Image (cartoon, rainbow, N blue to C red):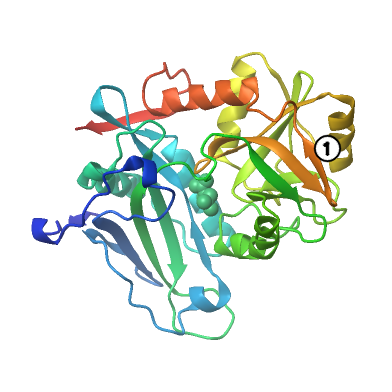
């Protein structure tokens, strides 16, 4: 299928933000978007790049009522020698199709989507910020658009990709964040949709997230839904705990998002000879380790957040400091290395980085 490309007239183009220090996350959107439609019997059709616009949706559209939708999050970087780089984007797209499968959404042709994504990024390349740590965030999304109120999978869908310049996800930047361990509410259950990137998982997190924020915490740390005991993930990232010289992260139990950054951290640590296990561990173990001094560092890993060091956490009303409360050595090393890789400055032994063009 050929991707039709429409270019917005120069006079209609938006003003690109000039102060990267004020970008924040998810507030600005570039001039174009990619769209493609699906109809039962016809399949995916009409791939096109067009001007960024509001969507016209029937108020009975199924995504709005029953949440049949999936999305992805990835980034394009303006890096070495003014090149434009993508990081493991095929892994994000493969995960998108797995999320589609779980939410009964038709599979996408990933070669076509990859091509569309690159074309869109190159068309809006002026929107990729220059400053270190900033990037163009890319958000593919699939929504069910049948105007129908019965509960069944939709017969028609809209796939679109939007993008926009972003800086740090957290107000703290790369400084340690504090997290709130949810002891009453849960994010996802085994057998549910926790491992799919679908909006409902994020909607389900909002109540506890609000509670956490009211108490002054940036994020919620979720425990397993059955025993409220085992550490699972943080709202927008996977999480790693360092006990002395061993790192632990939860295995992919089905209720956890299989993060691309999570996987990159695991592979990098293995290459560096750092001991890491994907094993279930409880919040009680974490607290015991904090008390006996063996809890050395904690960090989150995700596309939006990259690596987010955790300086403290609260569980059942008690605050606990992690190590000396500052960014741990591995968190810093991973952050620096991942950024160097993503910006094309570090040798890529994994085949993760693709230079798709230049300025
Ligand atoms: C990402 O890390 O890209 C995510 O999708 C998290 C997002 C919900 C902010």
Point out residue 47 in the picture as x, y percentages from the top left corner. 27, 59
Q: Residue at x 51, y 60 (%)?
A: 70
In the figure, 69 relative to 305: above or below? below
In the figure, 137 relative to 47: above or below? above
Q: Nearer the viewer, residue 104 or 168?
A: 168
- Quadrant position of the N terminus in the picture: bottom left
- Quadrant position of the C terminus in the picture: top left
Point out residue 148 in the picture as x, y percentages from the top left corner. 49, 85
Answer with the quarter of the image where residue 283 lies. top right
Total residue callouts:
1
Q: Which residue is mark 1?
A: 281
| Horizontal relation, residue 197 to residue 180: left or right | left
Point out residue 52 in the picture as x, y percentages from the top left corner. 26, 62
| Horizontal relation, residue 292 to residue 324: left or right | right
For the residue labelled by badge 1, is the local secondary structure a helix, a strand or a loop? loop
Point out residue 102 in the picture as x, y percentages from the top left corner. 59, 59
Q: Residue at x 41, y 42 (%)?
A: 167
| Horizontal relation, residue 357 to residue 85: left or right | left
Q: Residue at x 42, y 53 (%)?
A: 26
Answer with the quarter of the image where residue 29 lies. bottom left
Q: Nearer the viewer, residue 305 or 6?
A: 305
Q: Outermost residue toward the top?
A: 273
Q: Residue at x 62, y 35 (%)?
A: 176
In the figure, 297 relative to 94: above or below? above
């Amino acid at each position: 299928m050929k991707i039709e490309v429409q270019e917005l007239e120069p006079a209609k183009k938006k003003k690109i933000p000039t102060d990267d220090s004020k970008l924040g996350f998810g507030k600005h959107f570039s001039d174009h978007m990619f769209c493609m439609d699906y109809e039962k019997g016809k399949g995916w059709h009409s791939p096109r790049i067009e001007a960024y616009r509001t969507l016209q949706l029937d108020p009975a559209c199924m995504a709005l009522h029953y949440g049949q939708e999936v999305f992805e999050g990835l980034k394009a970087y303006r890096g070495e020698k003014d090149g434009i780089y993508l990081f493991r984007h095929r892994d994000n797209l493969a995960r998108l199709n797995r999320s589609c499968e779980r939410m009964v959404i038709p599979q996408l042709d990933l070669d076509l989507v990859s091509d569309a994504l690159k074309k869109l990024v190159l068309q809006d390349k002026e929107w990729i910020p220059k400053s270190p740590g900033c990037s163009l965030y890319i958000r593919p999304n699939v929504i069910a658009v049948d105007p129908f109120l019965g509960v069944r999978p939709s017969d028609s869908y809209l796939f679109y990709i939007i993008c926009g310049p972003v800086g740090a996800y957290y107000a703290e930047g790369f400084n340690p964040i504090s997290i709130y361990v949810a002891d009453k509410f849960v994010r996802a259950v085994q057998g549910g949709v926790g491992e799919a990137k679908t909006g409902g998982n994020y909607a389900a997190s909002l109540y506890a997230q609000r509670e956490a924020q009211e108490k002054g915490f940036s994020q919620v740390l979720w425990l397993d839904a059955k025993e409220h005991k085992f550490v699972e993930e943080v709202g927008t990232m996977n999480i790693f705990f360092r006990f002395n010289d061993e790192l632990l992260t939860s295995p992919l139990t089905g209720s956890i998002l299989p993060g691309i950054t999570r996987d990159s951290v695991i592979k990098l640590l293995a290459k560096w000879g750092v001991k890491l296990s994907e094993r279930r561990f409880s919040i009680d173990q974490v607290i015991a380790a904090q008390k006996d001094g063996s809890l050395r560092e904690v960090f989150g890993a995700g596309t939006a957040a990259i690596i987010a060091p955790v300086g403290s956490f609260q569980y059942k009303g008690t605050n606990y400091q992690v190590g000396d409360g500052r960014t741990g050595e591995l968190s810093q090393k991973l952050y620096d290395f991942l950024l160097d890789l993503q910006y094309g400055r570090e040798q890529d032994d994994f085949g993760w980085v693709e230079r798709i063009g230049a300025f």
